[in-house]
Image: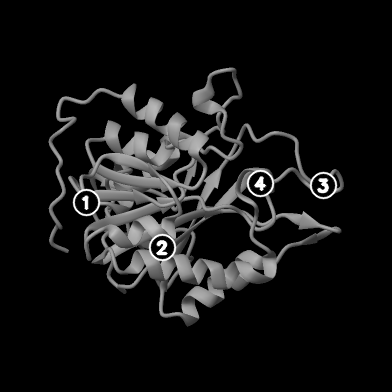
Amino acid sequence: MNLNQVLHGCMFDIVPTLPEKSVHAVITSPPYAQQRQRQYGGVLEQDYPAWTVRWMETVQRVLVDDGNVAIVISPHLRDGELSAYVLHTRLALRQAGWIECQELAWIKPTSPPLGHVGRPRRSWESILWFSRSREPFCNPLANGSLSDRLGLESVKGMGDYLHDREMRETYTGIARCRDYIEVATNQANKDDFNSHPAQFPERLAEWLIRLLCPRFGVVCDPFAGSGTTLVAAKRGRYAFFGCDINEMYVEIAQRRLDAVSTVAEDYFRFAPPSS
């Protein structure tokens, strides 16, 4: 099977056709529980943890040993109470043997005024980072920024702690990124590239790919939707593979991918990478 494509179909049928240990990072936003039912049919909250464990078992086979899975997800309010399916899902994945490496966050400064009118407007989403390895691939410098305070260490002395401190010498370099990214949500327009109801920004996908996938690695999105993760991977010169159960969104994803030109567009052909 060639990489650099998006296929129409269920991930439970398509992902198993990939060779073992052929994917470095799964970056995805699966259907939320009992939301977007018109597009995907929905997954009941009580079934969501088991359903997630099932699809994670499906991608586990194709992940390299230090591979990562990043899940963009958010609970919702129902009858005035925050739904618990995300919490139960995290615990179910841990019980199934997955290592929850860290909870990352997507801060949305332009989030629409939706949700319960009696609550603050929710302006962030969780990014759940899982791996089968306790030492997964991660490059926090890839999204880092220049700092002149690297190595700063303050040690309290015996006197007034406000004044009596010893400071280790600092140096300038790239600091590790923070555990969140602040990026605006996509602005609605008439372009069908943005017609997916739950499309996340390309900058978010780029940030996660740089953080969790090695250079020239393979990125997979088994719930590709309109293809944002795949577009970000192609633009960044990563190999990619995706699928979605909704044929209309697969067509949109393909048009978006076709609109991205890269110098090495046909460079990647499938060869199982080493972990």
In x, y percent, where is residue 200?
Answer: 51, 38
* Earlier residue among tags 2 and 4: 4
Residue displayed at 87% across by 47% down: 118
Between label 1 and label 2, give the one nearer the viewer. Answer: 1
Q: Which residue is mark 1?
A: 214
Q: CA distance from mark 2 to mark 4?
A: 58 Å
Mark 3 or 4: the one toward you = 4
Residue 152: image location, x then y, percent: 31, 55
Q: Are marks 1 and 2 in contact (CB under 8 Å)?
A: no
Which residue is rendered at x = 42% and y = 56% of the image? 11
Where is mark 4, residue-wise? Answer: 36
Q: How is the image coloured?
A: one colour
Mark 1 secondary-structure assignment? loop
Which of pointers 4 and 1 lies earlier in the amino acid sequence?
4
Q: Amino acid under label 1?
A: Pro
Which amino acid, by three-letter code, is at mark 4? Arg
The 10 Å Cα crowd at callout 2, few under 14, some 14 to 19, many 20 or more, is: few
Distance from the alpha carbon under mark 1 to that under mark 3: 40 Å
Q: In the rendered image, which quarter is residue 146 located in?
A: top left
Q: Is disc 4 surrounded by few (<14), some (14 to 19) or many (20+) residues within 10 Å?
A: some
Mark identifier at residue 164? 2
Q: Identity of the amino acid at label 2?
A: Asp
Q: Is residue 86 left or right of residue 162?
A: right
Give the camera-side residue of 6 and 128: 6
> Mark 1 Cα within 10 Å, few/some/many (few <14, many 20+)?
some
Tag 3: amino acid: His
Whole-angstrom CA distance, mark 4 to mark 1, is: 33 Å
Q: Which residue is mark 3?
A: 116
In the image, residue 124 sits, relative to residue 100, either above or below, namely: above
